[in-house]
Every structure is written in C-alpha cells, then in structure tokens.
Image (spheres, rainbow, N blue to C red):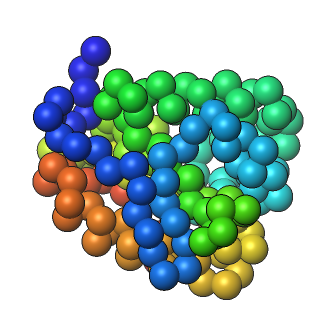
Amino acid sequence: MLTLVPRDFKVPERLDCPRFVIRKLCASDVYLDYMAVMSSVDIIKRTRGGKWPTPALTFEDDLIDLAWHQREFEFKSSFAYTVVNKEGTECLGCLYFFKPGTRKNPPENADVDVSFWVTQKGYEVGLYPELYQVIKDWLNEWPFKKPYWSNSELP
C-alpha cells in the first residue's frame, strides 16, 4: 500500500491548541462525531464542499467511515483528525490529509489534499478561520511541500 508520507515519518497523533485539541480520529469517537456532523450538515457541505454528509447518514455509516479513517491512518495512506474541546466532551470538527485527487482535481504538483470542517456552533464563534490558520501552521511540521486545500470556502 502506498503511503502519503515517508514510512519513517513519525505521524503526530495530537496537537494541543489554546481552545481545542486535534487528535487522531478513531472509531470510538463515533458518538461525538455523529452528533457534530448531524447538527451541521449544511455548514459542512457549504464550507468543505462535496456530497457528504447527507441528512440520511446513519450512526452505523458514520462508524464504518471512522473505522476506515482509523485504519488508513495506521497504514499512513491518509490522516483524519477530530477537533474536540479541551475536555474532550464535544466534537467541534474534523480535518483530513488525503492523497491528491481523492476529493477534487488538484494542481499537478500537489502532494496532499487538505480539507476540514467545523460545526455550525463552531462556525458561529469563529472557529473556522482559527482552525484554518492552525492547520496552515501545523503543515510546516509535515513533509508536504505543495498542499492543496480542497474546501469550497476558505477564510
């Protein structure tokens, strides 16, 4: 299986920020993730773009998605992170590092597709531009040289 990063790259599993924590997304996050997604379908589709999520998303579908993301993280083929409050009791959003072309047609020289979303509540309190800046800064610690931001709307 092809990896998104060099095999010897130590993939960070957590980033502590002043207002939130970014950590590896796992299947066990399904309850908080599902609540966040279903409360924010419209804002996710508007800002991130694409056809996901739909109001018909089931808890079981979300569990399958999260398990798949967790497995891909372990294989280093893509990386999905959950964004949670400092207490870890609320999902505020997610971010993804995928192979270019997974979601949209990137420029030819792109080496990663970066996308993210926040909940409606998070969007209303300014989390969207804050998370964007955190991700931009965090990318300096990754081996990517030409990130492609596939969100439909960027701050």
Give the tally of numbered discs: 0
Question: Which residue is at the far top?
Answer: 1
The N terminus lies in quadrant: top left
Query: Residue sitting at 67 percent across and 25 percent down?
Result: 64
In this rendering, position of residue 24 left or right of residue 109: right
- Residue 151: % across, % down: 48, 57
Q: Residue at x 37, y 57 (%)?
A: 149
Q: Splitting the image into 4 quarters, where does residue 27 fall?
A: top right
Rendered position, 6 above or below 149: above
For the question of whether residue 46 can be seen, the reply is no
Q: Looking at the image, is 59 positioned above or below residue 154? A: above
Across and down, in percent, residue 21 comes to 52, 66
Q: Position of residue 109 (x, y in %)?
A: 15, 44
Q: Position of residue 71 (x, y in %)?
A: 47, 25
Q: Is residue 26 above or below residue 124?
A: above
Which residue is pictured at 72% across the width and 40% down the height? 30
User: Could you tell whether 12 is left or right of 118 in the image?
Assistant: left
Residue 32: tell me if it is visible: yes
Query: Dividing the picture into quarters, in which one does residue 53 lie?
Result: top right
Residue extending furthest toward the front: 87
Q: Residue at x 60, y 71 (%)?
A: 86
* Front residue of 154 and 35: 35
Left or right: 154, with 94 as reference point: left
